[in-house]
Structure formats: structure tokens, C-alpha cells
Amino acid sequence: MHNSIIFHLSANKKLAYEIASILKLPLGEVEIEKFSDGEIMCRNLSNVRGKDVYIIQSTAEPAQDNIFEILIFADSLLNSEAKSVNLVIPYFGYSRQDRIARSGEPITAKVLAKIYQAVGISKVITVDLHTQQIQGFFSCPVINIDTAEFFGSYMARFLSELNINHKDVVVVAPDHGSALRARDAGSMFNGASIAFIDKRRPAPNKSEVINVVGDVKNKTCVIIDDIIDTCGTINNAFESLIAHGAKEVYICASHGVFSSGCLDEHIKGVFITDTIEKQIKGVKVLSVAELIAQAIINE
């Protein structure tokens, strides 16, 4: 690690500082300029010759600008004779476009995987990919950091401090795809049970709850999800759990996109991470800097 250097671009500046501090690594200097016609320039200002470089950059809104910054800055680093260029992408934009759902659709996550590698990215570290299959779109190594136990451990301590018995806790998967995430989070409690919500998506960014599978009556429910975007899925899940007799509901999600909509004010508590640097009133942000730093150390 002594021959490594960390850069941030326009996103995740605070997270990059925290990671660099934990690893005791220098932060490189970069000049970022956006021209009047919308074109972007990113120029390396540090000595990276022979060094392993880590770019910290999520690709949330503005996704296209953030992605393009990565691409052109990677070229700048390689032109500066960096030994390797590694991409730490806490929130992987376009991860929900990972398959063909309707005829004619692109697999955009696969397109981005090819593009990142085309500009010389040699390794990717990310947090809670929407689906594991995205790792298969890359031919370079991909480290996917799972936050299920991170959230489970935090919520187990948090609810214990509120004198809530873990046997009165239900960890809830908001859909079938989150069942393993809920199970892993639930393993951090002493006696919590698991439930999941059976839902369908009639259209993009819309969901309908079909049923709640599991006993949530008079229970404290903790929903574990990867993304909060329009808040529709979470609000529907909350309403359904309350309708099935849940006492109170907490929400944990890795990525707080919050592109539109707002959370139901009766949700007891909402916890996200800092993969996307955005402050939302009433939402507590937990840092994943330590998780990412450990992933860099252990690679």
C-alpha cells in the first residue's frame, strides 16, 4: 500500500478523504473543468508514475458526467504512467439495467463494464451491486462489498439500546431478490425472524405489494434493501407491514438515490450509507469508509 495514491473526482469527496485517512495514503490532485458546451476535462496534477491509483467515484446523478469523468481521468492517469488504475465505485449507476426485461432493451450494466475496462481500469471495488450477475460482465477482478451484516450489526445494537428484544424483531426483504440480504442481516440479531414481501413491478419505478410472507404482527420490522430511489417500494412495503399488524418499521438501504418522492413520515427510522453524498432530512447516514478501506487492504 505504500506505493498507492487515492483520487476523488466530483462525487464522494468526503468519503475519499475518510478512506485516505484510514489507509494513511495521500490524496492526489486533479483539475476538473466543464466547458461552456458541456464537455468535461479531468487532468492529473500528481506524480503517479509506477503507483497503484484508486479513483473514488459513484455514478449517481449526474450519472453521465460522473461516468465520463472516470473514463477520461483513467486515461490521464495512464498517460502519467500509473502502474495500475483501480476504480472504487461505491454506487454503480445503471446497475438496475442488468438484463433484458423487454424486447429491444440494452443491458446497460454490461455496456459500462466493457467501457470501464476499455479505458484501462484493472480492478473494480463497489458496494452492494443490484445483482451479483453484474460481476460476470467484467473480465477484470470485481470486489462487491455486502452491507447486510454491517446494517444488521448496527441495528442489533441500536434496537438493544431501545430495550427491544431481538425475538420481537423481524428482518424484512422488500422483494424476492433481497431474501439473502435479509437473512445475512438477521444473523446479526439474537433470535430475530425473517419475512419477505411478494411484489411485482407493473412499470419501471413502480411496484405493487401482493402479499407479506412471514409473521410481523406486533413486531418491530427492519427492512433491508439496496436502493431507495422514488420511495414507492419502501412506502408500499411500510403500508403493507402495518396493515399486517407490524408495531413499527425501520428502513436500511445502502444507496440513498432519492430521485423523487418522499418517505412516509410514520416510518420509525431510516438509515443509509454515504455511497451517495446526499443529506436527507430525517435520514441517518452511516459511513462505509472502513469497509472500503478494508477491501483495498485485503485485495
Image (spheres, rainbow, N blue to C red):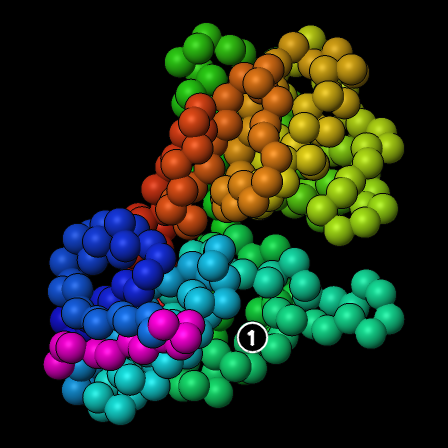
Query: Is residue 83 rendered magenta in the image?
Result: no
Residue 64 on image: x %, y %: 50, 67
| Residue at figure coordinates x 56%, y 23% from the top left | 250
**Along the line of sight, which residue is nearer the eye, 278 or 88?**
278
Quadrant (top left, top right, bottom left, bottom right) of the N terminus: bottom left
Q: Circle 1 is placed at which residue position?
A: 112
Three-letter amino acid code of the residue under disc 1:
Leu
How many numbered markers are drawn?
1
Query: Is residue 42 rendered magenta in the image?
Result: yes
**Along the line of sight, which residue is nearer the eye, 55 or 184?**
55
- Residue 274: image quadrant is top left
* Left-right relation of 104 to 156: right
* Left-right relation of 104 to 24: right
**Residues in magenta, as a range:** 36-47
> Relative to 122, is 164 above or below?
above
Quadrant (top left, top right, bottom left, bottom right) of the C terminus: bottom left
> Relative to 242, is 60 above or below?
below
Residue 235 on image: x %, y %: 67, 28
**Crowd band around label 1 with a 10 angstrom C-alpha radius: few (<14), some (14–19), many (20+):** some
* Left-right relation of 244 to 132: right
Residue 125 on image: x %, y %: 42, 65
